[in-house]
Image (cartoon, rainbow, N blue to C red):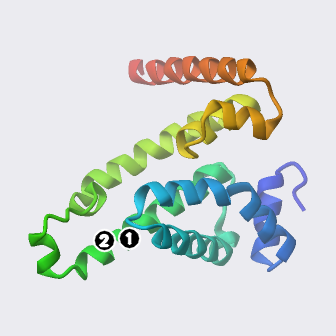
Amino acid sequence: MHTEDPDYDLMQRVASGDEAAIADLYDRFGSLVYRMAYQTMPTRADAEDVVQEVFVRLWRTADRYDPKRAALVTWVMLLSRRHMVDRLRRARARIKPGLLEEGWSPPAEVREPEAAMVQDERFASVLEKVEKLPELQRTVVLRAYLGGQTLKQIGQELGVPLGTIKSALSRALVKLRERSCVEEVR
């Protein structure tokens, strides 16, 4: 066990089939993956299917998690996003011409795969910066922007006053802007 890295330990336990670890992984990221899927997929049923498929994929690839390459949240969100893009592409390949005539338009990730790859890189870069924030700031940013929660909901779930949540978000956004400016100068 690498007690200095609880995320690595968790993924090693998931890889070994530890049901409690799988439940822990789902408890940590299930709602985040679901919110992302719900915003991306055409139906609620598709979003629910995606969540199941993503967690099966996480379980099957858990032994490949490398904390030196990415934080666990980054790895989970990138794997989720790639899975959704792949699923949308497959759906696009099966679309009947009649649907296109009716005005259905696939999401941008399906129409422009190169743009989706650039967006994946940007997404990973932003998640890496978010991972470097203090815990409360990181939690608020992830839940607000990736999880789609309101600041009030986040405060209630964490048992933290709304003013503290607002301050944490404000400080986090300032730090993220500063880090982006520093990188642009380099």
Q: Which mark is residue 113?
A: none
Q: How far from the left and from the top, in percent, is residue 52?
A: 60, 74
In this rendering, position of residue 91 left or right of residue 161: left
The answer to whether residue 66 of the structure is visible from this angle is no
Residue at the spot x=36%, y=47% of the render? Answer: 119
Q: How far from the left and from the top, in percent, is residue 54?
A: 57, 70
Image quarter where the N terminus lies is: bottom right
Characterize the local packing of mark 2: few (<14), some (14-19) or many (20 or more) Cα atoms within 10 angstroms.
Answer: some
Q: Please identify the quarter of the rendering in which residue 62 is found.
A: bottom right
Q: Secondary structure at mark 2?
A: helix
Q: How far from the left and from the top, in percent, is residue 63?
A: 70, 71
Amino acid type shown at disc 1: Asp
Give the residue pinned by disc 1.
86
Judge whether 177 appears above or below 101 on screen: above
Give the residue pinned by disc 2.
89
Q: Please identify the quarter of the rendering in which residue 152 is found.
A: top right
Front in this rendered view, residue 45 or 24: 45
Q: Are marks 2 and 1 in contact (CB under 8 Å)?
A: yes
Front in this rendered view, residue 97 or 168: 97
In this rendering, position of residue 85 left or right of residue 165: left
Amino acid type shown at disc 2: Arg
Judge whether 89 appears above or below 171 on screen: below
